[in-house]
Each structure stands twice: as C-alpha cells, then as structure tokens.
Image (cartoon, rainbow, N blue to C red):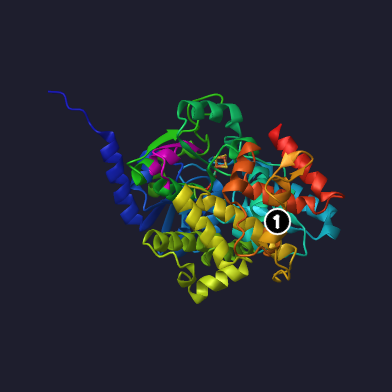
Amino acid sequence: MSQTLDTSVDIREEILRWKEKRNAVILAHNYQIPEIQDIADYVGDSLGLAFHAQETDADVIAFCGVHFMAETAKIVNPKKTVILPDANAGCSLEESCQPEDLAAFLKENEEKNYYVITYINSSAAVKALSDVICTSGNAVQIVEAAPKDRPILFAPDQNLGEWVSRQTGREMEYWEGNCYLHVEFTRESISRIKEEYPDAAVVAHPECTKAVRLLADEVCSTEKMVHYCRDCEAENIIVVTEAGMLHRLRKECPDKNLIAGPTDRCACADCRFMKLNTMEKLLSCLKTLEPEVTMDEAERAAAEAPLQLMLDLSKTPAWDQRFLGLFDRCTEKYQGGNTDFNTYFTDVDLELLESIGYRTRELFDFVEDLQDYGEPSREMALRVATVRRAYYIDEMERQAGKNTVLPSDLPERGDELSGIAWLPRILTKARGKLRGELDPDIMYGCGGDRKFLAEHGLDMADFLRAVWRAEGADDPDQAMVDYVKSASA
Ligand code: 13P
Ligand code: SF4
C-alpha cells in the first residue's frame, strides 16, 4: 500500500525542534504565508514586531518579514542573533530612499533645519539620518509630537505622509516614494468590488493612494485592521492591502466575510518581497543561523536613537485611542439609560477633553445622535475632534475661545450665500466649532448640517478643515462657496 508523506507536518515539527534548540523566537509580519503565521510566536504589524523584538529574551530572533523589519529587530536588540529566511526580501519603499540621496538633500537644504520623520520601511542608514521613526500604526502620534517650529520632511512614503498630514493638519514636505504594491489598488478596481458588495465596509492601508483611501471607511495599519474588522458592524469587509492579511483576519474574525481588495491586474495582491519567505527557508535559517543581520555599530547606534524615540512616544496611548475609549464608555452609559452626561466623566476624561479643546456636551451630542439616528459614526466624531484639536493647538495655542456663539447669532435656516441655502448657518457653526465657542445648545453636525453636507457630497470633518483653510483666503466666504460648488460638481 502506498503511503503519502505529509511533508508540511514534518517541516513544521523540524522548525519547532530547531527553534527550541536555538532558543529562538519566531516573529512574523501579517503578510507572511499562512504556514509561517501559524507557526510564529507572534504575528503583527511593524510596530508590534519592533516592540516584541526589543522585549524578547530568546537568543535568536527568526524574523519572517522583510529585511528592514529584521534590521529594526537588530537595532533595538543588538545582542541577539537576528536571522531571516531570505536576505533578498527587500521593500520598494526602502529602495526609493537611498541614504546618500537623503544625506545630500538634507545638506543642500541645511538652512531649512528639517525635522525628519522616517517611515520604518527604510534602511538603518536612512533611519540614522532621521529625527524620529514612525510606522503606519503610530504616524499620527509621532507627527503630533514633532516640534512646531521646524518644517517636517516625511520620508519615504508620500501616500502615508499625505494621509497623516490630513489627520493631523500638519503640513509637511514629502520624499517621493511609494509601495509598488499598494499603489496598484485603484479607484476603479475598488469601486468595482464595492459595486459587487454594496453593503461592505472598506478598510485600506495608508500606503494606498488618496483616490483609494477616499473610498475607504477606515484607513489604518495592518494591526488596527484586526480591531476594525472585529468591531465593524458590516458582515462583508473589503480589505485593501497585501493578501497575507486575510489569513490573520479570518482567524481573528471568523464571523466576517473578508474580501481581498483587487488591484487592476489581479484578484488579490501579494508583495513579491514578503512572499519570498517559505517554510523551507525558515527551517534552513534556524539550522544554519544564516542569513544573519549584521551592521556597523556606529550606524546601529545612530539608527537606534530615532527608533527608541518612536517606541517611547508609542507607549502612551495616543489621544485618539483615549477619545474612542471615552466615546465607547459614554455610549454604554447612554445605552444603559443614563442621559445625564454630567455624570459621565472622570477628572482624567475632563483633562483629555480639555487637552483637545473639547467640551463634554460636544462629545455627548455625537454619542446621542449615533444612538438615536445612527450617525455620525464614532470615527467621524474622532475626525471632527482631530480637526478641532489641531486648530486648538496650532491657531489658538491651547487657549480657550473668549466668545460664545449663541443660538440667536445663527443665520436663519433658509438664509443663502451665493444661492446656497443653509451655508451661512453651517459656516457660523463651523467657525464657532473650530474656536470652541459654540453655545452648548448648538451642535455642529446636527441633522440639518448632515442633510446639507450629504446633499453637497461633503463630510463634516473635511468641511471643518476647509473652513479653517479658507480663513487664509482674501474672501473666506467666497472660498467656501467655491469649495461647496466644486464638491457638488
Ligand atoms: P504595517 O506596519 O501596517 O504592518 O505595514 C507594513 C508594511 O510594509 C505595509 O506594506
Ligand atoms: Fe514594502 Fe510594499 Fe511589500 Fe510593505 S507591501 S513590504 S511597503 S513593498
């Protein structure tokens, strides 16, 4: 009788045997093939992997991801032997920013005194030229912590940079780089799959182009995608990132139908670098301890400082996470029948709201409307708070507004500006909202505002930011008329 050998079981066992022999830990990125994810001690995004690499007490780190990730592990934990299955597992973002080019650019522009924020998808030599590193999971937090009096150079992912700039309201200059894979998702390819699943939610990685990000309900790092899919009410979720992510998501969210976002060329997207790693190569590197990540100590130390700064800044939960946590706690109280929002907040909550220029009633109005009318979403509440916070910090230098916009100050509902009804009213509210000067009985983003915004194809966070931008125009009212008309067109 012929017997079929299940080699996958053999290789799994061999890997586990060698892992023990080497006292190794296997760290794997969310894009790795299913077999590698299933055998790894930890699977996560670049940020989680960097933390795990720093904390491990194993002698050997077998890093299943791409080279810059393994190199990062070595930078933060130099005494360990760091090996990777395939030394050719590079990254198009890393390639797009060569250290000589960045050094030359910084020298040429020395007088600008750039604060250089570099995406972790870069070489150790490029990291060494940076002030701080970020990942897609903490980029907002890192940009917000950047000194206000220095211009930011964001390298090397322009798409991530533009997304963070929009989140934080912080202008910056970009290094021209991108992820070859994420830019293959297009407005057309994602619109087509959305037509197929009209009720699906869309989650996209910030390395995608703006045209794709605009179609997404949520834009976030691979690890945050796990949380988003778990919490999302939609059953169908289109996932716009590298296809390996689907394995992790299907394990973590078994009740969801997770659909791989297609590119224009294919039904799913594999990163040619991430997919160089195989079980055979993992076994081989554990056996031979090669390829091993090595680097010049001076360069390692220079790269460690901005990386360590990133890790330190990431330990404090970012204000946005705290805001969403508070939003959820308020929602629970409201659902439990308590409508007296004055009883909702602890001193710590009040401190958080004060630090972003927010008042308790503003948060409560969003909680209440979401429960009673199904909108605006908690994510929209966060995006509005993001604009308000940026304005409070940048324009008001964290000082509370001195005036109050009263209900009697609001233009009538039917008042028009250049023939656009409701615009005078929402503009007055938006200006008051930006300055934190709205009377508690006025809600920016109430049902009437939402109807107006929907009719003109706008959203309330973007509108608020446009009002802010228009403050710099010769005629702010006219700038807003133009903005609304161009959105409607
Ligand atoms: P994450 O840090 O979100 O996992 O992203 C890494 C990456 O390379 C995305 O292409
Ligand atoms: Fe680099 Fe893109 Fe691959 Fe991520 S998916 S490792 S950014 S090439």
Residue 297 forms part of the magenta stretch: no
What is the span of residues highlighted in magenta in the rendered image?
A: 232-249
In the depicted structure, whether residue 6 falls above or below residue 388: above
Task: Give the residue at mark 1.
Answer: 410
Q: Is 105 in front, or is 263?
A: 263
Residue at the image point whose x is 40% and y is 43% from the top: 249
- Please provide percent x and percent y for residue 80: 47, 61
Crowd tier of the residue under label 1, counting other residues whose Cα lies within 10 Å: few below 14, some 14–19, many 20 or above: some
Residue at the image point whose x is 59% and y is 53% from the top: 383
In the depicted structure, whether residue 377 falls above or below residue 247: below
Would residue 205 be visible to someone looking at this image?
A: yes
Question: Splitting the image into 4 quarters, where does residue 254 fall?
Answer: top left
- Please provide percent x and percent y for residue 187: 60, 30
Q: Is 228 in front, or is 56?
A: 228
Q: Amino acid at mark 1?
A: Leu
Residue 243 forms part of the magenta stretch: yes
